[in-house]
Image: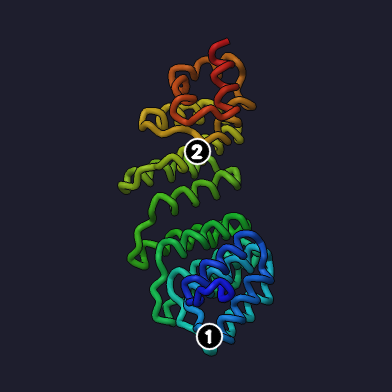
């Protein structure tokens, strides 16, 4: 950049570090981070968030912790985005206890936990098999003056299906709508997939119909699951609801296959 006559600044360095991280070139990202300090460019909370996200994704936990320690000693104060990044990284690397402890400690730093932080930890708890902790955490959300959003509900629904708790998932869908939070396409995808994988075909098709009534389109992965799970007769009965999907969603291979089965 300097060789081309451009004077680097924090924003341009953040963009480059983000590009390195997304392309899994962590060593180059770390080198650029060090050069920022050497050249008097002070990394911001955005810089740390970008770099930590890349480190967590590659499982480089010790390096991530080193940067966290450095930030706490001489760097910027963490914000909601950075805490969310850390929570997500800890959960994805199996550090659930550490993530729970972090969320508990956030309020003491002057940052108020938000729904996104709770949702991230909720996902980690379900994936880690900590069902009681997940239920407790979900119930804490309104106690903190927060309102679960569609992502929070969908995360919990996915967690319940993951643990073969379809009855509880179905109840939560009803509760979700009663509380004024309408399902989106991701919610319907999650519900349909959960019922299909649990061999509850009628319920899956019921929610597919509701999905189409609300003008949402199932994802390609759900269409693939439909093709691989339902009988030919069951697929033909879906023609009324799915005949327009190739036009709406584009000519994906799974949609072509489904259209061909329905037309056979």
At horizontal 44% and vertical 39% (from top left) the residue drawn is 185
Q: CA distance from mark 1 to mark 2?
A: 41 Å
Seen in the picture, residue 29 relative to 254 is either above or below; the reply is below
Residue at the disc numbered 1: 72
Instruction: Looking at the picture, tell me which residue is in the foreground, 192 or 79.
Output: 79
Number of other residues with Cα within 10 Å of mark 2, as a class: few under 14, some 14 to 19, many 20 or more: many
Quadrant of the image occupied by residue 257? top right
State the image coordinates of residue 91 (x, y, percent, origin top left): 59, 64
State the image coordinates of residue 72 (x, y, percent, origin top left): 53, 85
Residue at the disc numbered 2: 189
Seen in the picture, residue 166 relative to 111 is either above or below; the reply is above
Secondary structure at badge 2 equals helix
At horizontal 61% and vertical 64% (from top left) the residue drawn is 21
Image quarter of the C terminus: top right
User: Can you see residue 82?
Assistant: no
Q: Which is nearer the N-term, disc 1 or disc 2?
A: 1
Instruction: Looking at the picture, tell me which residue is in the foreground, 77 or 9.
Output: 9
**In this view, the mark in front (1 or 2):** 1
At horizontal 58% and vertical 71% (from top left) the residue drawn is 52
User: Can you see residue 96?
Assistant: yes
State the image coordinates of residue 178 (x, y, percent, origin top left): 32, 44
Secondary structure at badge 1 equals helix
State the image coordinates of residue 130 (x, y, percent, origin top left): 59, 59
Q: Which mark is residue 37?
A: none
């Amino acid at each position: 950049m300097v060789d081309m006559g451009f004077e680097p600044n924090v924003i341009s360095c953040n963009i480059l570090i983000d590009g390195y991280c997304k392309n899994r070139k962590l060593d180059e990202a770390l080198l650029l981070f060090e050069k920022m300090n050497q050249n008097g460019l002070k990394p911001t909370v955005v810089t740390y968030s970008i770099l930590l996200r890349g480190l967590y994704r590659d499982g480089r936990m010790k390096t991530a912790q080193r940067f966290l320690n450095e930030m706490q000693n001489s760097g910027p104060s963490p914000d909601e985005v950075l805490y969310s990044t850390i929570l997500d990284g800890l959960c994805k690397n199996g550090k659930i206890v550490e993530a729970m402890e972090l969320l508990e400690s956030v309020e003491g730093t002057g940052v108020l936990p938000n729904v996104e932080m709770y949702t991230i930890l909720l996902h980690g708890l379900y994936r880690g098999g900590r069902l009681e902790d997940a239920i407790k955490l979900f119930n804490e959300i309104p106690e903190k003056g927060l309102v679960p959003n569609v992502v929070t509900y969908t995360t919990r629904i996915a967690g319940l299906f993951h643990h073969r708790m379809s009855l509880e998932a179905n109840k939560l869908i009803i509760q979700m709508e009663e509380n004024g939070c309408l399902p989106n396409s991701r919610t319907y995808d999650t519900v349909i997939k959960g019922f299909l994988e649990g061999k509850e075909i009628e319920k899956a098709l019921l929610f597919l119909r509701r999905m189409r009534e609300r003008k949402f389109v199932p994802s390609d992965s759900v269409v693939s699951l439909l093709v691989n799970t339902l009988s030919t007769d069951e697929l033909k009965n879906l023609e009324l609801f799915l005949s327009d999907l190739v036009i709406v969603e584009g000519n994906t291979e799974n949609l072509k296959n489904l259209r061909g089965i329905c037309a056979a």
